[in-house]
Image (cartoon, grey):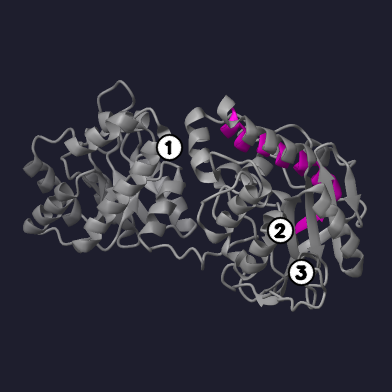
Amino acid sequence: MHLTCTNVTKEKIREVLAKMKGCGMQNVLALRGDPPRGQEWKEIEGGFPHAIDLIKFIRSEYGDYFGICVAGFPETHPDATSYEDDLKYLKEKIDAGADLIITQLFYDTKIFLKYVNDCRKIGITCPIIPGLMPLHTYASFERLISLSKTKIPEELRKALEPMKNDDEAVKSYGVKLCMEMCRELLANGVECLHFYTMNLERSVTLILEGLGLLDTNGTYRRLPWRSTPALTTHRGKEDVRPIFWKNRPKSYLQRTQSWDEFPNGRWGDARSPAFGELSDNHLMSLHVPKSDIQNRGKIWGSELTNEAQLEQVFVNYLKGDIPCLPWCDTPLSHESDPLIQDLMRINKSGFLTINSQPAVNGAPSTTENIGWGPKGGFIYQKAYVEFFTSPSNLEKLLKILPKYPSITYHALNLKGDAHTNAGSSTNALTWGVFPAKEVVQPTVVDHDSFVVWKDEAFAIWKSSWLPIYNSPEKSSSREFLDGVISSYYLVNMVENNYVNGNIFAPFNELISGSDKVPIGKQEF
């Protein structure tokens, strides 16, 4: 709890402390606080003039019940008469009962390390935790340093100058810079790091991952999809989604952001008003900047004139040689690791995959890469694969699929021509069984939502990939890709036999020309 002396009376502080103790809170950051905007700081009647007075009051009222933290200023408090006087006041706050120090932000680790050394020289022995804040945008950086009077190393200013109009570049540089600072601090004996996130936690997560301080594999996932905190504030009751947006969660959340609660159990009932909103045209990222288009050309190829080249792009993604596809904004999930060889084989044969998951039959909920939900549970899921393919490939596949009655499918092209053996039913794809809970069924395949996803999936071809070939000299690439978009089908397949089924069996038969070829069965 941050407690300040600004415009606050002793009675108000006494009331807050009582409430804190009543609900079990024990940690306080005791600050003088900043003055109201445009004013000088002044003590109010019945209040506290300085943080030290607040500390003494807390100790007099509650003894050692509260742990008290105070602020430290490696570059000196703006109102201090000198660096030495500021250290003296800090020592007085510690002597008055404070337990630890968190510092104001800084961008020169040498300043912090000298500050710690100077504190030790005058007898301050408590922990001193560095306050760190990654850069997010150049504008916010400028505002911050003007308010905090933070000193900026000249090399930092020079590094930021060329990229100050590129927020993404500044953010990436900020992550890298903060990681370097953290490594230097840890190497010099610092045992704890404090991050100012300003409600922008993604950069801090990247920093912790880069430092090896965050075990991403062991991180508890309430449900199996990727979390998008900035868009999920009011979605605590959501517990089921169509699988099609698995690799584009932001788009799905934008489509459904007006829902106060996910329509749990409504899949299959297209009359639901909330379900109807899913079909609204909320396509994401349809405008692609020129610089981004050029970068995508480097990733997916500046020339694309035949199916072999197209297939190779998808294979390169599976191999990890390129970081993304238009429908997958991150590298392939480790969940699909057991499927890699089979996925590469079918992609080389023109089945261009954009989504997949292996069969899982009762894996513990703590299993690496696929686990989700509380400990002590068990996870089940049907094998799933989703892909684009040509009409001729689809025709051949449809002739083989009747041999595999446990596999259901939906296929749609841009015009809406459909092939399915599953009708309009809803198919549970993933579920979990946990102690003292009902069965949780978080992902489904549903025909009506697949129709909506089909429109978005084909629009992504046009918005993300086609613009690479807008120049006249690349007209043959554009002509080829236009043909793919207008003729290919988007297909999803589910192997409903999650115990003994093999979703790749029909592909292997088709590719090999014989159902006698040994078929690998991948499952958890």
- Circle 3 is placed at which residue position? 512
Chain-order first, disc 2 or disc 3? 2
Residue visible at 26% across and 36% down in the picture:
159
Horizontal relation, residue 256 to residue 175: left or right: right
Spot the residue most to the top.
38
Inspect the image, locate mark 2, and give the three-letter code of the amino acid beneath it. Ser
Circle 3 or circle 1, nearest the eye: 3
Residue 264: in sight, yes or no? Answer: no
Location of residue 213 (image quadrant): bottom left
Span of residues in magenta: 442-471
Verify whether residue 388 appears in magenta: no
Upstream in sequence: badge 2 or badge 1: 1
Left or right, 516 with reference to 189:
right
Q: Nearer the viewer, mark 2 or mark 1?
A: 2
Residue type at tag 3: Ser
What secondary structure is found at the residue carrying circle 3? helix
Q: Is residue 304 left or right of residue 496?
A: left
Determine which residue is flagged by label 2. 349
